[in-house]
Amino acid sequence: MERLSVEERIFLYNSYMRSGESLEGALKKWRSQRNGQPVPSRSTVHGIVERFNRTGSVGDDTEALKTSQKRVRTPELITAVKEVLSEDPRISVRNLGRRLNISRETARTILADDLSLHPYKIQIVQPLTIENARERSEFANEICDLIDTKKLKPERIIFTDEAHFWLNGFVNRQNFRVWGSENPHMSVSRPLHPEKVTVWAGICSEGLIGPIFLHDKELINGEIYHRLLQEAFEKIDDLGLGPDFFWQQDGAPPHRTEVNLSLLRSRFGKRVIAKGFKEKFGEGINWPPYSPDLSACDFFLWGFLKDKVYKSSINSKEELRDRIREACSELDRATCTRVISSFEKRVRMLTLREGWHIEDVMV
C-alpha cells in the first residue's frame, strides 16, 4: 500500500464513504483539491476502508503488526513452514514469506536454522538403463557390506576426477534477467573457441590433493593421465596419508588403460575403486557407470571451486589458475571430512532406490 499521511487517508475515507461519492468521484475530488500530488490507486483506497472497518482507524494497524511479530519463529509458524514445504518443496523463500505473511529473512532463517534445510540445485544427470541401475545397486550393496564388516572406512577413500574451467565462466540465460520498459538487447560475448584450464584434483577426509593442472592445449589421454597419477602420488606422500587409503576414479577410457590400472595396483594393491580393475586383477571394486551423485568431486568439489572462482571476471588463464589455487586453499579439513561422510549416506540411500539416481536435485 502506498505511504500516505493520516490526514490524506482521512481525506480519502471521508470523500469515498461519508460523502456518498463513487470511488471515481473520490479520486476526482483528490485531483481537484490536491493538484500535483500522485493519485492513489484503487487498491489503496479499498485498503484504507478495509482497515477502518477492521480497526476503527485509518492509522497503521499496530496490533496486527504486534501479532505478526509474535508469530515470528514460533513453533506454530515452524510447523506451518513444514506444511507448506510438504505441499510445494520447490517454493522460493520469497513466495514462502508472502504465503505466511513473514519476511523473506525470517523464512530463510526458519528453513536453515530451525529445519536445517538446504536449497539444493538442480543436477543434470545421464539417463540410466535398467542394466546401469543394476550395476549401481550392486555397487552400493557391496560398499555397504564392506563398511558393515569393517573392511572399508569411507573416510579412507580418495575421490579423484578432472574438470574444465572456462576462462569466460558460464552465463545461465534462464536465470539472467534485466528489468526495464524497453528491451536493452543485452548480450554476452563469447569467443568461438573459448579458452579453458583443465585441472585434476582428489579429495579425502584429510584434505584436498592438488590441484594439478594440465599444460596448455593438452587433452587427457592414457599417457598424460599416467603423469597425473605420478604427480598425485607425490602429493599423497606430502600429506602423509597412510597405506590403508582406497583410490576412486570414474570409468573414463584414459583412466583404465592397462598401464594406468597396473600403476594403481602397484600403489594401492586391491584398494582400488575403478571400472575395469576387478576384471583385470580379480580384486578391487568396480566403479558403476553414470554415478556423479556418488563421487565427492562431482556432487561437491567442482561446484564449490567454481562458485569461488567465478565470483568476478577473469582476464587470463594464469589468473584463472591462481583463482583455482586460492579456492582450493579455502577448503578446510573439517569441510572435507563432512563431504566424505556423506558418501556412506548416499550409497545406503542408493540401496533403497534400487540403483536409480539418488535425487533429482543436488548441491
Image (tube, rainbow, N blue to C red):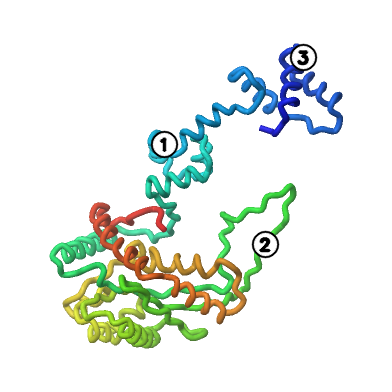
- Callout 2: SS: loop
Q: In this rendering, does residue 222 appear at all?
A: no
Residue at (38, 49) in percent of width and height: 116
Please identify the quarter of the rendering in which residue 174 is found. Answer: bottom right
Query: Observer-nearest residue: 121 or 257?
Result: 121
Number of the front mark, 2 or 3: 3
Number of the front mark, 1 or 3: 1
- Callout 1: SS: loop
Whether 176 is drawn above or below 58: the answer is below
Image coordinates for residue 215, horizontal then vertical, percent: 48, 86
- Label pair 2/3, CB-CB below 8 angstroms: no
Q: Is residue 15 left or right of residue 86?
A: right
Q: In this rendering, does residue 101 appear at all?
A: yes
Query: Observer-nearest residue: 172 or 149?
Result: 149
Q: Is residue 282 left or right of residue 26?
A: left
Amino acid type assigned to the residue bearing label 1 in the image: Thr
Precedes in sequence: disc 2 or disc 1: 1
Q: Is residue 353 left or right of residue 317?
A: left
Q: Specify the label residue 74 is tagged with.
A: 1
Q: Quadrant of the N terminus?
A: top right
- Callout 3: SS: loop
Image coordinates for residue 353, horizontal then vertical, percent: 27, 52
Neighbours of disc 2 within 10 Å: few (<14), some (14-19), many (20+) = few
Q: Specify the label residue 187 is tagged with.
A: 2
Amino acid type assigned to the residue bearing label 2 in the image: Ser
Whether 327 is drawn above or below 115: the answer is below
Which residue bears the numbered disc 3? 21
Please identify the quarter of the rendering in which residue 163 is found. Answer: bottom left
Amino acid type assigned to the residue bearing label 3 in the image: Glu
- Label pair 1/3, CB-CB below 8 angstroms: no
Precedes in sequence: disc 2 or disc 3: 3
Precedes in sequence: disc 1 or disc 3: 3
